[in-house]
C-alpha cells in the first residue's frame, strides 16, 4: 500500500450513504472557512454563521420568504435540466422568464378592468406560451441553421430586456403613473393567491412542486426521459437508436422556456403585481447553478434551490444585523458553492490509496 | 461626412472592442482545450481591481498589469484545480467563480473607489490584442503544441492514449484564459475608463463568452465577432446622436440582434462548424479509466 | 423546533444586540453599492452626514444592492422587523414595495425617494435637479464654440427628460443656434459605454458633454479629448480638472438629518418634499475659474440666487412642444404636475423621447 499516491477511481455504484455524507462534509468545510473569514474581518464567527444560516429562517415569515425565493429558482432549474440532460446549453432562461412575464403580464394589463376566475389561468397559459416562444427561437435556429444555442439564447436575454423596457416606457405605461416606466397594477384576480395569510409564499409553489413531480416522472419513467438521457450521453447512440434529435432539442427548449416563462409570470403576478424593468434578480442565471448543484435531479434541485435561496437571505441578514458588506456575502456564497461542487467528487468517484487493480 | 469623422468612429470602435477581444481569445483557448469557464466576468472584475489598486499603491503601470495578470492566474488556477482535479461541474463552478469574483473585487476595491488616476493610452493594447489573436491562430494551426491542445479538446481519451498529459494541457489553457480575462479587466480600469467602481465591467464577460461561440472556436473570427458587436454598438450611438426618430431601445438592441443574425449565416454551413467545436467541451477527464 | 430557534435568537441577541434602548434606528435600502460613486454613493454620504449630526441618538444600517423586485419587500421588511424606526428607500421602483411593508408597520416611518404616493407613515422626497440643469444650460450656451452639446441620457423617465428640457431651454435662450445631440444608453452605470457615448458625441462635433448617468467616465473622456463637461451627482473636478465646468450635487444629508431628528423628537409627519437649491438639496459644485470667465461665473451665481428666492424658474413660459403647440403660456411657470410626468421634448430638440 502506498499512501502517498492516492488515485481517483469512478464509483461503479453510488452508495446511498455518500449522498448524505457529501453535503455534510461540504457544510462542515463551509462552517470552518466561514469562521476563519469572519474572524479575520473582525466579526464573531459563531454569531456570523448563525446570522447567515439560521436567523433568516428562524421565523415563519422568514421561512416563507425562503420559499418565495426558492420557487422560481427551482422551477427554472427543473426546466433547464430538460435541456442540460440533452447537452443543450440554454443559458438564456432569464430572457424566457422575461418573455413569460411580458405575455402573462400583457394579459393582465389588457384585462385590467375585468375581474374573473379565468384571468389567472389565462395568464398562466400566456406566460408559458411567451417563455416557450422565446425558447423556440434558439431551438429553431439550432435545428434549422445549426446556430449555437449558447450565443442565441444569451443574446435573446438582452433583447427581451429591451422589449420589456420598450413596453413599460411606451405602450403599456400606467396612464396615471406620471410617465414613470411601469405598467398599471394588476387587479386582484390577476394575482397569484397567497397560500397563507400574511405570508408571501404563493400558489406558484404548488405549481412548482407539481411540475417537479411530473418532471421526476418524465425523467425516470417515460421513453422521452430516456431519450433525453441517451442522446445527452451519446448523440451517436441516440441516432443509432433512431431518436429524432431535432424533435428532442425543440421539445427540451419548449419545456424549459415554458417553465421559465411560468416562473416569470409567477413573479409578476405573485409578489410584484405589475410590470417594470427589473422584475427578476437574475433568477434565470442563478437557476443554472441550482440545476447543476442538484445534479439535474428533481429532488436534488429542490434542495439546491433552498440552499442557494438561503445564501441570499443570509447575506441580507448579515448586512442588517452585523453590517457585513454584501461583498462578503458574495464571497461566502461563492465558497459555499465551491465546497458543495467539490464535495461531489466523493459521490461520483472514490479515492483509493495504492495501486489501481 | 469627412475622413476625420470616419476615423474618429473607427478609433472609438477599436477602443471599445479591445477588452472583448482579450477576454474572448482567452476563453477561446480555454474552451479549445475542452473546458468551459463561465467565470469570465468574475475574473475580469478581479483583474480590473487588482490593476487599479496596484497602480494607486505603486504608481507603476507595468506592475499594475503584472499583478492583474497574476490575479487572473490565481482565479483561474483555483477554477482549474476544482474542475480538473476535483472534477466539479464546469458550468456551475464557472458561475460560482463569477459570484466569488464580484464579491472579492468589491471587497478589495472598497477603499479605492473614487481615487483619481492617470489613464494610460489604449493604443498599445489595441495593437497587442490583434497580435495575440494572430499568435494564437498561428499556435493552433502551425505548431505541435497547438495541435496537442486541440487534440486534448477534441478527444481527451485519444490524446491521453497518445501519451499527452491532458490535465497539464488543460491547466495551462485555463490559466492562459484567466490571465487574458484579467488583462481585459485591467485594460478597462486603466485605459478604457480609468477608475475603479464596483461591477464596472458591466456584463462584458458574458458578451465575450458569446463571441467565442460566434467565432465557432476559430481565433481570427473572434475579431469578426467582437468587432461586429462593438461596431454596431458605436454605430447605433452615432445614429442616435444624428437625431433619427426610432425608439432608443431598438438602437440598443441592435448589437445583440446583429450578432445572432450573422452567426446564423455563418453557421448554416454545417460542415465547417463541426470541424472546430471542441468535442470534449465540459466533459471531465479522469485518468483511471 | 421553532420555539428552540426563537430561544436561541433571543439568547444571542441578549449577548450581541445593542443595549441602548433610547437610540433610534435608521435603515437605508440602496439600489447599488455605495461604491458606485454616483446615486447610491451620494445617499451614503447623506447617511454619514446624518450620523455625524445626530451622534448617539441614532444608529444606522443599510442594505446595498437590493434589486427593485420581489426581493425589495423582504429587505425593507427585514429592516422593519429588526426594530428600525425610520427607513429610507432610495430608488423609485421601491414604491409599491415600500407601501406594502408600511401597511403592516404603522408605527414605523418610511421615506421613499423620488416617489409620488404618500401614506400616513410614508413620506416622499426628491430634489429639483432641473434647477441645476438650467444653470448648466446657461453656461453651456455661452461656452460652446461649435454650438453643439452632447447629452448622455440613461432611461427615458421624467427625471431625465426634465433635465434635458431645462438644460435646452436655458441654453437656447442665450444661444439660439444651439443644437443638442442626445444618446440614450439605457443604463445608469457602465463606465465603458458612457465613455463611448461621450467620445461619439465629441466626434460628432459636441464640445460640451452633459451626462445623466452615474460615473465620471464621460467627464474623463471630455478631459482626454480637450472639450468641456459637467459632472454628475458629486463634484468630479479632481477626475477631469481641465474639463469640469461645474456639477449638480445631490445633497441629501440635511434632509436626512432633519427627518431623523424629527423621529427622535417624535415630531415626524408624512409629506411630500421636493426641494431644490433653496433648501440646499441641489448644490452647484464650485465653478471652474480656469475655464469660465468671471462674468459668466457671476451670472451663474446670480441665477442661483434668483432660483433660491423664487424669481427665476427653469420652466417659465412660453414653452412649446416639438409640434409647436404651447404647453406653458407666457408669464406662467410649469406646474409641478407637468414637471413630474414630463415625457416630451420642448421645441428645438431633435429626435424623440424613446417610448
Image (tube, rainbow, N blue to C red):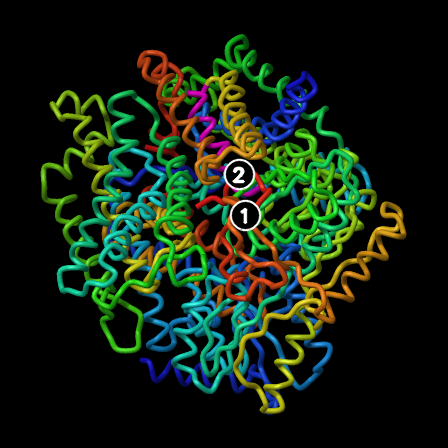
Q: Is residue B103 above or below residue C108?
A: above
Identify the subunit bearing mark 1: C
User: Which mark is first along the chain, 2 or 1?
Assistant: 1
Q: Which mark is residue A155?
A: none
The answer to whether the residues at label 1 and label 2 have Cβ atoms under 8 Å apart is: yes
Residue A49 position in % (x across, y down)? 49, 68
Magenta residue span: B201-217
Q: Within 10 angstroms of label 1, few (less than 14), some, or many (20 or more) residues?
A: many
Q: Residue at x 58, y 67 (%)?
A: C126
In depth, the one of A11 and A239 nearer the eye is A239
Q: CA distance from mark 1 to mark 2?
A: 9 Å
Quarter holding residue B127: top right
Q: Which mark is residue C351?
A: 2
In depth, the one of A348 and A128 nearer the eye is A128
Q: Is residue A144 magenta?
A: no
The answer to whether residue B47 is seen in the rendering is no
Residue bearing mark 1: C345
Q: Is residue B213 magenta?
A: yes
The quadrant of the picture occupied by the N terminus of chain C is bottom left
Residue B155 position in % (x across, y down)? 37, 20
Residue A32 position in % (x across, y down)? 51, 62
Q: Is residue A18 above or below residue B288?
A: below
The answer to whether residue C245 is seen in the rendering is yes
How many labels were placed on the picture? Answer: 2
Local SS, label 1: loop
Residue C173 position in % (x across, y down)? 71, 48
Q: Residue at x 21, y 29 (%)?
A: A231
Local SS, label 2: loop
In depth, the one of B12 and C151 nearer the eye is C151
In depth, the one of A206 and A140 nearer the eye is A140
Q: Within 10 angstroms of label 2, few (less than 14), some, or many (20 or more) residues?
A: some
Magenta region's main secondary structure?
Answer: helix
Amino acid at each position: 500500500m502506498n499512501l502517498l499516491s492516492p488515485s481517483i477511481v469512478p464509483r461503479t455504484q453510488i452508495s446511498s450513504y455518500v449522498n448524505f455524507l457529501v453535503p455534510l462534509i461540504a457544510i462542515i468545510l463551509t462552517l470552518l472557512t466561514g469562521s476563519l473569514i469572519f474572524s479575520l474581518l473582525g466579526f464573531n464567527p459563531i454569531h456570523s454563521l448563525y446570522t447567515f444560516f439560521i436567523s433568516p429562517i428562524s421565523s415563519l415569515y422568514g421561512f416563507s420568504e425562503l420559499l418565495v425565493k426558492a420557487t422560481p429558482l427551482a422551477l427554472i432549474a427543473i426546466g433547464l435540466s430538460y435541456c442540460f440532460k440533452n447537452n443543450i446549453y440554454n443559458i438564456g432562461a432569464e430572457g424566457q422568464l422575461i418573455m413569460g412575464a411580458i405575455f402573462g403580464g400583457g394579459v393582465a394589463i389588457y384585462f385590467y378592468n375585468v375581474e374573473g376566475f379565468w384571468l389567472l389561468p389565462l395568464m398562466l397559459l400566456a406566460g408559458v406560451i411567451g417563455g416557450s416562444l422565446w425558447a423556440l427561437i434558439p431551438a429553431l435556429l439550432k435545428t434549422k441553421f445549426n446556430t449555437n444555442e449558447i450565443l442565441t439564447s444569451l443574446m435573446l436575454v438582452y433583447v427581451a430586456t429591451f422589449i420589456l423596457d420598450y413596453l413599460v416606457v411606451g405602450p403599456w405605461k400606467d396612464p396615471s403613473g406620471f410617465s414613470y416606466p411601469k405598467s398599471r397594477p394588476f387587479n386582484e384576480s390577476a394575482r397569484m393567491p397567497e397560500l397563507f395569510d400574511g405570508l408571501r409564499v404563493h400558489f406558484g409553489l404548488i405549481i412548482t412542486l407539481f411540475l417537479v413531480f411530473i418532471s421526476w416522472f418524465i425523467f425516470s419513467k417515460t421513453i422521452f426521459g430516456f431519450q433525453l438521457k441517451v442522446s445527452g450521453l451519446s448523440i451517436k447512440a441516440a441516432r443509432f437508436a433512431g431518436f429524432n434529435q431535432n424533435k428532442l432539442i425543440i421539445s427540451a427548449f419548449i419545456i424549459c422556456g415554458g417553465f421559465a416563462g411560468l416562473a416569470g409570470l409567477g413573479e409578476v403576478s405573485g409578489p410584484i403585481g405589475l410590470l417594470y424593468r427589473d422584475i427578476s434578480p437574475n433568477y434565470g442565471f442563478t437557476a443554472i447553478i441550482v440545476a447543476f448543484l442538484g445534479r439535474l435531479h428533481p429532488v436534488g434541485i429542490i434542495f439546491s434551490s433552498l440552499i442557494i435561496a438561503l445564501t441570499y437571505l443570509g447575506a441580507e441578514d448579515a448586512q442588517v444585523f452585523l453590517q457585513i458588506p454584501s461583498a462578503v456575502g458574495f464571497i461566502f456564497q461563492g465558497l459555499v458553492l465551491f465546497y458543495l461542487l467539490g464535495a461531489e467528487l466523493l459521490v461520483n468517484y472514490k479515492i483509493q490509496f495504492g495501486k489501481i487493480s | 461626412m469627412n475622413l476625420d469623422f470616419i476615423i474618429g468612429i473607427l478609433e472609438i470602435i477599436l477602443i471599445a472592442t479591445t477588452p472583448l477581444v482579450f477576454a474572448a481569445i482567452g476563453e477561446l483557448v480555454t474552451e479549445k482545450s475542452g473546458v468551459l469557464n463561465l467565470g469570465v466576468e468574475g475574473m475580469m472584475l478581479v483583474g480590473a481591481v487588482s490593476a487599479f489598486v496596484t497602480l494607486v499603491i505603486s504608481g507603476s503601470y507595468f506592475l499594475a498589469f503584472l499583478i492583474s495578470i497574476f490575479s487572473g492566474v490565481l482565479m483561474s488556477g483555483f477554477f482549474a484545480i476544482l474542475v480538473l482535479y476535483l472534477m466539479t461541474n464546469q458550468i456551475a463552478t464557472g458561475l460560482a467563480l463569477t459570484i466569488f469574483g464580484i464579491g472579492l473585487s468589491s471587497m478589495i476595491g472598497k477603499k479605492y473607489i473614487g481615487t483619481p488616476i492617470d489613464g494610460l493610452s489604449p493604443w498599445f493594447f489595441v495593437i497587442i490584442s490583434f497580435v495575440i489573436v494572430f499568435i494564437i491562430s498561428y499556435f493552433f494551426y502551425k505548431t505541435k503544441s497547438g495541435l496537442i491542445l486541440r487534440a486534448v479538446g477534441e478527444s481527451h481519451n485519444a490524446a491521453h492514449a497518445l501519451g499527452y498529459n491532458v490535465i497539464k494541457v488543460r491547466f495551462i489553457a485555463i490559466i492562459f484564459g484567466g490571465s487574458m480575462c484579467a488583462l481585459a479587466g485591467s485594460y478597462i480600469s486603466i485605459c478604457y475608463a480609468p477608475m475603479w467602481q464596483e461591477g464596472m465591467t458591466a456584463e462584458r464577460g458574458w458578451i465575450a463568452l458569446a463571441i467565442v461561440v460566434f467565432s465557432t472556436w476559430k481565433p481570427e473570427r473572434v475579431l469578426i465577432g467582437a468587432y461586429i458587436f462593438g461596431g454596431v454598438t458605436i454605430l447605433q450611438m452615432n445614429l442616435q446622436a444624428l437625431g433619427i426618430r426610432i425608439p432608443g431601445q431598438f438602437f440598443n438592441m441592435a448589437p445583440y440582434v446583429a450578432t445572432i443574425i450573422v452567426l446564423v449565416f455563418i453557421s448554416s454551413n454545417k460542415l465547417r462548424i463541426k470541424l472546430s467545436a471542441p468535442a470534449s467541451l465540459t466533459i471531465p477527464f479522469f485518468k483511471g479509466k | 423546533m421553532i420555539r428552540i430557534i426563537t430561544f436561541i435568537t433571543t439568547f444571542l441577541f441578549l449577548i450581541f444586540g445593542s443595549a441602548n434602548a433610547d437610540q433610534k434606528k435608521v435603515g437605508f435600502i440602496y439600489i447599488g453599492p455605495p461604491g458606485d460613486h454616483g446615486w447610491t454613493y451620494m445617499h451614503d454620504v447623506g447617511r454619514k452626514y446624518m450620523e455625524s449630526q445626530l451622534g448617539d441618538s441614532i444608529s444606522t444600517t443599510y442594505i446595498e444592492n437590493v434589486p427593485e423586485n420581489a426581493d425589495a419587500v423582504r429587505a425593507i421588511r427585514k429592516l422593519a422587523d429588526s426594530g428600525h424606526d425610520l427607513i429610507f428607500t432610495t430608488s423609485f421602483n421601491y414604491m409599491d414595495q415600500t407601501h406594502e411593508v408600511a401597511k403592516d408597520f404603522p408605527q414605523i416611518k418610511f421615506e421613499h425617494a423620488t416617489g409620488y404616493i404618500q401614506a400616513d407613515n410614508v413620506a416622499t422626497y426628491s430634489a429639483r435637479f432641473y434647477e441645476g440643469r438650467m444653470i448648466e444650460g446657461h453656461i453651456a450656451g455661452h461656452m460652446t464654440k461649435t454650438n453643439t452639446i452632447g447629452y448622455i441620457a440613461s432611461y427615458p423617465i421624467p427625471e431625465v427628460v426634465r433635465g434635458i428640457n431645462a438644460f435646452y431651454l436655458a441654453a437656447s435662450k442665450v444661444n439660439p443656434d444651439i443644437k443638442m445631440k442626445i444618446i440614450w444608453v439605457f443604463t445608469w452605470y457602465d463606465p465603458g459605454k458612457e465613455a463611448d457615448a461621450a467620445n461619439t458625441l465629441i466626434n460628432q462635433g459636441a464640445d460640451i458633454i452633459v451626462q445623466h448617468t452615474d460615473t465620471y467616465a464621460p467627464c474623463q473622456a471630455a478631459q482626454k479629448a480637450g472639450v468641456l463637461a459637467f459632472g454628475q451627482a458629486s463634484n468630479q473636478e479632481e477626475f477631469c480638472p481641465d474639463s469640469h465646468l461645474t456639477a449638480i450635487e445631490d445633497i441629501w444629508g440635511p434632509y436626512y438629518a432633519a427627518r431623523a431628528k424629527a423621529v427622535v423628537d417624535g415630531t415626524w409627519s408624512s409629506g411630500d418634499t421636493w426641494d431644490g437649491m433653496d433648501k440646499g438639496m441641489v448644490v452647484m459644485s464650485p465653478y471652474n475659474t480656469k475655464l469660465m470667465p468671471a462674468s459668466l461665473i457671476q451670472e451663474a451665481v446670480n441665477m442661483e440666487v434668483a432660483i433660491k428666492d423664487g424669481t427665476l424658474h427653469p420652466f417659465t413660459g412660453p414653452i412649446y412642444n416639438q409640434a409647436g403647440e404651447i404647453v406653458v403660456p407666457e408669464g406662467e411657470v410649469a406646474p409641478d404636475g407637468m414637471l413630474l410626468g414630463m415625457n416630451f421634448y420642448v421645441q428645438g430638440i431633435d429626435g424623440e423621447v424613446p417610448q
